[in-house]
């Protein structure tokens, strides 16, 4: 059975931390494919400085140097709030013989029980998460037990965290700083060429 690692997010922009996490999980899972899916509109957080969907999609494509990495525009095409349950349903329909592994960040994983159609998510995908801090592993393991009682399957691994965030990248761009260490080279070039994230911060 083919294993597909599914990694969704605003990717505003995609950065080296995202790529590192996806690669590490893909190796540990034994995934044949990693699918990056930029959200149209994130249902869980406000995103006032969200770059246009086509720009975020293109940056994801430029970041995919691994042969098993692919990018999907399914959530951008669908529009509206990007609910994970809907995305997993669509993926399962087009990949009926594959096992789906959903990669989430620490913060998102710790709220999964309250997501839209959580039971659908639990049924369709193995839930993956890694800590973002030295003391973050135990809370993930504890919450995984709660989710497993609800019928979820979990895959928690202590993967080295790269201290990079999309907010950090956007702020660096606005401040005229070099982002070469934060994002893949082609993504840095794309941001510069398209003058993304240059608007002034709201005070």
Image (cartoon, grey):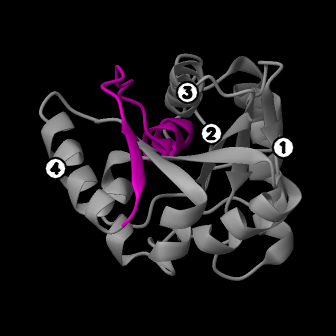
Q: Nearer the viewer, residue 179 or 145?
A: 145
User: What kind of element bears circle 2?
Assistant: loop
Residue pointed to by mark 4? 142
Q: Of the residues under marks 3 and 2, which one precedes in the sequence? A: 2
Image point (35%, 77%), residue name: 114
Asked if the stretch drawn in magenta spans residue 154, the answer is yes
Magenta span: 151-174
Q: Which of 98 and 11 is in front in this view?
A: 98
Residue pointed to by mark 1? 58
For the residues labelled 3 and 1, say whether their Cβ atoms are less than 8 Å apart. no
Residue pointed to by mark 2? 14
Q: Which of 31 and 55 is in front in this view?
A: 31
Residue at mark 3 to residue at mark 2: CA–CA distance: 22 Å
In this view of the protein, can residue 11 be seen by the observer?
no
Quarter of the image for the C terminus: give it: bottom left
Q: Is residue 181 left or right of residue 13?
A: left
Q: Residue 134: give x, y in percent of width and height.
A: 16, 27
Q: Residue 192: give x, y in percent of width and height.
A: 74, 34
Above or below for 106 versus 137: below
Marker count (numbered)? 4
């Amino acid at each position: 059975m083919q294993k597909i690692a599914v990694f969704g997010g605003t990717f505003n922009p995609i950065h080296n931390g995202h790529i590192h996490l996806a690669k590490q999980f893909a190796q540990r899972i034994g995934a044949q494919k990693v699918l990056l899916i930029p959200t149209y509109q994130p249902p869980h957080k406000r995103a006032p400085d969200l770059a246009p969907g086509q720009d975020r999609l293109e940056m994801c494509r430029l970041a995919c140097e691994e042969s098993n990495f692919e990018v999907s525009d399914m959530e951008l095409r669908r529009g509206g709030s990007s609910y994970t349950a809907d995305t997993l349903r669509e993926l399962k329909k087009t990949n009926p013989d594959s096992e789906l592994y959903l990669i989430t960040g620490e913060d998102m994983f710790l709220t999964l029980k309250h997501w839209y159609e959580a039971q659908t998510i639990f049924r369709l995908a193995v839930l993956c998460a890694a800590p973002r801090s030295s003391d973050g592993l135990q809370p993930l393991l504890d919450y995984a037990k709660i989710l497993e009682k609800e019928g979820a399957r979990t895959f928690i691994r202590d993967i080295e965290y790269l201290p990079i965030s999309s907010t950090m990248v956007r702020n660096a761009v606005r401040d005229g700083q070099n982002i070469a260490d934060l994002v893949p080279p082609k993504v840095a070039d794309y941001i510069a060429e398209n003058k993304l994230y240059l608007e002034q911060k709201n005070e």
